[in-house]
Amino acid sequence: MRISVVIVTFNSDKIIKNCLDSVNEADEIIIVENSNRKEFKENFENYKKNLKIILTGSNIGYGRGNNIGIKESKNDYVLILNPDAVLAKNTINILKKTLFDKDFAIAAPEVNNNLSEINTLETLTDYNLINVEYVKGFAMLIKKSKFKNFFFDENIFLYLEEIDLCKRAKLENENIFLVKNCFVQHYGARSHNSEYNYEMELSRNWHWMWSKFYYEKKYYGNINAYLKTLPNFFSAFFKYLIYFIIFNKKRLIYKMRFLGLLNSYLGKKSFYRPKLNENI
């Protein structure tokens, strides 16, 4: 069982080394950088001997970026990692030992946000699998052959793309395993350089709302999607008005939530992109 690691980055220079240092057991590592930053490629392409960096030319989104890396990978098993995720020692080897003879479409290590307390991975022998409905996308192992070259839904720019992938796997009666006794730590919202934090927060709020309606509509129909999201729509609208009146910067967050849902209601594509070179 050979495992490729795919990491989609976007201005992730300051965090990516921790992630790369935790995947030493990988047979192949592919970074898909959602930009045309040649300096990023030059700085990191020699960091590991089995590392390949692909520049997409622009910010094409998390799902589409992963699809490029998955299709470029040489192995049937691909571990999707966020740049702000760090694997515990020996995690990839445990995944190999545990899953090599199992029938599954998706699997994931267990989350543990204090890896410093874990020091027995080398000698663990009790490997446990829990069949779950979904796993989080910051660390998920997929078996390519189970998806017939159709991986992440590229209509989704950000959020719920991994839930969508898991949903499709379950509809095909495939197994999704949480693998106990191997671990990942996810730092959350740190996958890009800190100077972009606020603009990225605006982008996250826009896309979270857009993706929520899109996902509900895709699997459960229009009526259910509206019922699920209309409370978010009106809440965002009224909170925007309140914060606008008192001239609080939070108004921009709720403006993004409102606009994300509105554009999803109107059937528009998830077009919003972080404006990294503009003043907020």
Image (spheres, grey):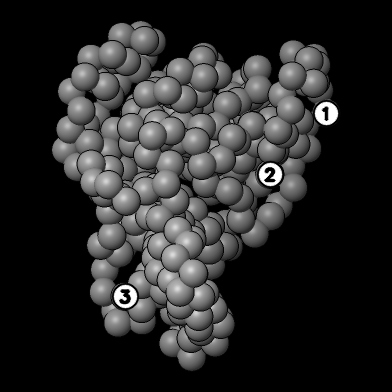
Residue tagged 2: 178
Residue tagged 1: 126
In front: mark 2 or mark 3? 3
Label 1 CA crowd tier, 10 Å (few <14, some 14–19, many 20+)? few
Q: Amino acid at mark 1?
A: Asp
Q: Amino acid at mark 2?
A: Leu
Label 3 CA crowd tier, 10 Å (few <14, some 14–19, many 20+)? some
Place residue 271 in its image quadrant.
bottom left
Q: CA distance from mark 1 to mark 3?
A: 49 Å
Dots 1 and 2: beta carbons under 8 Å? no
Label 2 CA crowd tier, 10 Å (few <14, some 14–19, many 20+)? many
The secondary structure type at the circle numbered 2 is: strand
In the displayed structure, 268 sits above or below 193; it is: below
Is 182 left or right of 268, judged from the image as shown?
right
Where does the image place residue 77, in percent across and percent down from the top left? 47, 35
Dots 2 and 3: beta carbons under 8 Å? no
